[in-house]
Image (cartoon, grey):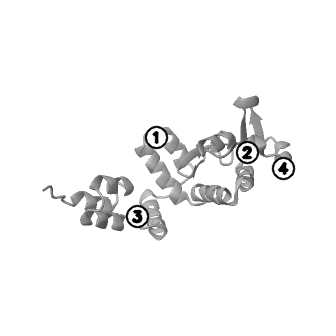
Amino acid sequence: MNNSHHIIHIDGHPFQADDSGLWNLTEIWKTLGLTRSKAPSEWRTIEAKRFAGCPQKMRSLGQGVTSHILADKQVTLRYAGWVSFKFEDMVYAAFEAVLAMPEVAAVVANKMVELGYRAEAELLERHTNADADYAIRQCNRLFKKVDQRSPEHLYKAVQNGTMTKERALSLIPSKSVWAGRVEAIYVYDF
């Protein structure tokens, strides 16, 4: 199935599609703590009703308070747009990061292994053939543009004493040159 078992990260939380390539909108809504008025069950626009008539795009599991609404990529993006423009942008970026940039998917898979989610990482890795070292270089380049937490800046922060080695190492890919450089910094204890 298209997008089957793909994982997207929205606001730092991972969400995995099921075997049919559908994401659980109710889980996303609950996990992100969106208001009750923005629950998937409250999405009753003409567009939502159109999607509800197409089970391969959107369907409901269960009844009442235990029900969950599942949706494909298109419907998930439309739901996000109904919630807010900001939320739509976050969800769109999450899909693009994993589904359109295999090098990011490889880095996410590596991080998942580090966190103990080996089986889920293997599912994600099946959908990308990006070289892990290339992925790390690409992400470092992208993240350097986004903020000042590039490996080089983290290394300098440890040298200056404004960050601990442990904190820096938790933010730097473990096999990178910068991780080795941070590890080699000797911290003086007075």
Q: Kindly identify the residue that appears in the image at 76 percent across and 40 percent down.
A: 41
Q: Residues within 10 Å of mark 1 (few under 14, many from 20)?
A: some
- Viewed as shown, does residue 151 lie left or right of 126? left
**Badge 4 is on which residue?**
45
SS at badge 4:
loop
Nearer mark to the viewer, of 2 and 1: 2
| Camera-side residue of 22 and 47 | 47
Q: Nearer the viewer, residue 21 or 14?
A: 14
Q: CA distance from mark 4 to mark 2?
A: 13 Å
Q: Earlier in the sequence, mark 1 or mark 3?
A: 1
Which label is found at residue 37?
A: 2
Task: Tell me the distance, in whole angstroms, between the alpha carbons under discs 2 and 1.
Answer: 36 Å
Hey, what amino acid is under mark 4?
Answer: Thr
- The tag on residue 55 is none
- Badge 2 or badge 3: first in the primary sequence: 2
Mark 1 or 3, which is nearer the eye? 3
Please state which amino acid type lies under the numbered disc 3: Arg
Say if mark 2 contacts mark 3, CB within 8 Å. no
* Callouts 4 and 2 close, C-beta under 8 Å: no
Kind of element beneath mark 3 = loop
Question: Label 1 vs label 4: CA separation?
Answer: 40 Å
Q: Identify which residue is drawn at 77% across, 43% down.
A: 42
Where is residue 143 drawn, in percent x and y?
46, 65
Q: Is residue 65 placed above or below 117 in the rendered structure?
A: above
- Locate the N terminus by quadrant: top right
**Can see residue 166?**
yes
Task: Give the residue number, with chain letter if any, for mark 1.
Answer: 118
Q: Which residue is mark 3?
A: 149
The residue lying at 47 percent from left, 63 percent from top is 139
Q: Looking at the image, is mark 4 or mark 2 nearer the viewer?
A: 2
Instruction: Tell me, yes or no, if residue 22 can be seen here.
Output: no
